[in-house]
Amino acid sequence: MHADSGSSISPCASLEGAHEHPQTAAAETERRGARVRRLLVDSPTSVGARARARRWMLLQRNFPGLGGMRVLDLGGTLEWWRRAPLRPAQVITVNLEDQDSGSDRSLRHVTGDACTAREVLDAAGLSREFDLVFSNSLIEHVGGHARRAELAHQIQDLAPNHWIQTPYRYFPVEPHWLFPGMQFLPMAARSRIALSWPLTHTRAKTLAEARDGAMWTELIGLTEIRSYFPDSEIAIERFLGIPKSLIAIKA
């Protein structure tokens, strides 16, 4: 009865469709994930964009003379400063990734390890005299307590003022992958999530690459940031009343 159903679909066509369907479903899941991520963090009207706008206002309130400052951005990008509402007199970024400084003399990039920023600046022949060290979501990626402590030492040595932001470890959603509680899971589970979760910003191509990204991400809490920056005020950003990120501010 089932064989004589009147269907014109051949067994080969059915088999071909069965092979195509998972790929189509995966692509649709990817598209939906990208749309959700844009709504949450990437679009100009997203929750994340509004939080970044509030953070920028807090930065300007704490450093009203920012427009005349010489700023060292550890781990940042020149493009971020090109799009900033207010441009400091000079910005130097130190990052492991190469960036094109372009023709604007107020923006300069130096490729190197932010945890050895003094040596990187010396090697580039640049002055260590800065008004402000700025860092956004770097300290959780440098590789353990010893490296975080060294980064904090460099920050406090290079300028009298600093602004160091990092996501809060105990916020319910891991902020890089937007997965609930990911930071508390075993590394094997975190690696699988980093490979396949559709809300990931940049999807890893292999499990090894996903594992590497997860292992280089170690969120910290209030006790740790106070230990690294004992003379700083710690501002707490909240979402729905829940602490979401921490900012060590010395102004």
Image (tube, helix red, strand yellow):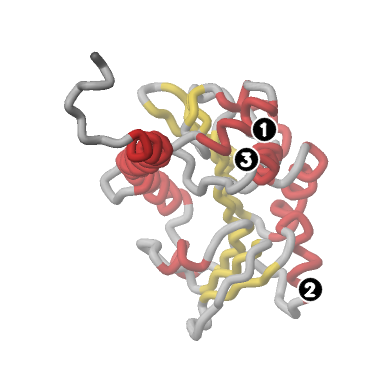
Mark closest to the chain's N terminus, 3 or 1: 1
Instruction: Tell which circle, 2 or 3, labels the residue nearer the N-terminal end.
Output: 2
Q: What residue is rendered at 55% in x and 43% in y?
A: 165
Q: Amino acid at mark 1?
A: Arg
Given the current orientation, which residue lies at the most extreme left position?
Answer: 6
> Residue 226, which numbered label?
1
Q: Is residue 244 left or right of residue 132?
A: left
The residue that mark 2 highlights is 122
Residue 64 placement (x, y as % from top left)? 43, 57
Which percent across, then down, holds residue 141? 67, 44
Which kind of residue does numbered mark 3 sit on?
A: Ser
Left or right of 228: which side holds 10?
left
Q: Is residue 247 left or right of residue 188?
A: left
| Cα–Cα span, label 2 and label 3 | 27 Å
- Local SS, label 2: helix
* Residue 95 seen from this side: yes
Camera-nearest residue between 23 and 214: 23
Which is more toward the observer, 137 or 61?
137
- Count of marks, rendered view: 3
Element assignment for label 1: helix
The residue positioned 52% from the left and 30% from the top of the image is: 174
Residue at screen point 60% across, 31% down: 192
Is 244 above or below relative to 55?
above
Image: 19 above or below 121: above
> Which of 106 and 249 lies nearest the eye of the viewer?
106
Q: CA distance from mark 1 to mark 2?
A: 29 Å
Q: What residue did someone put label 3 on?
A: 232
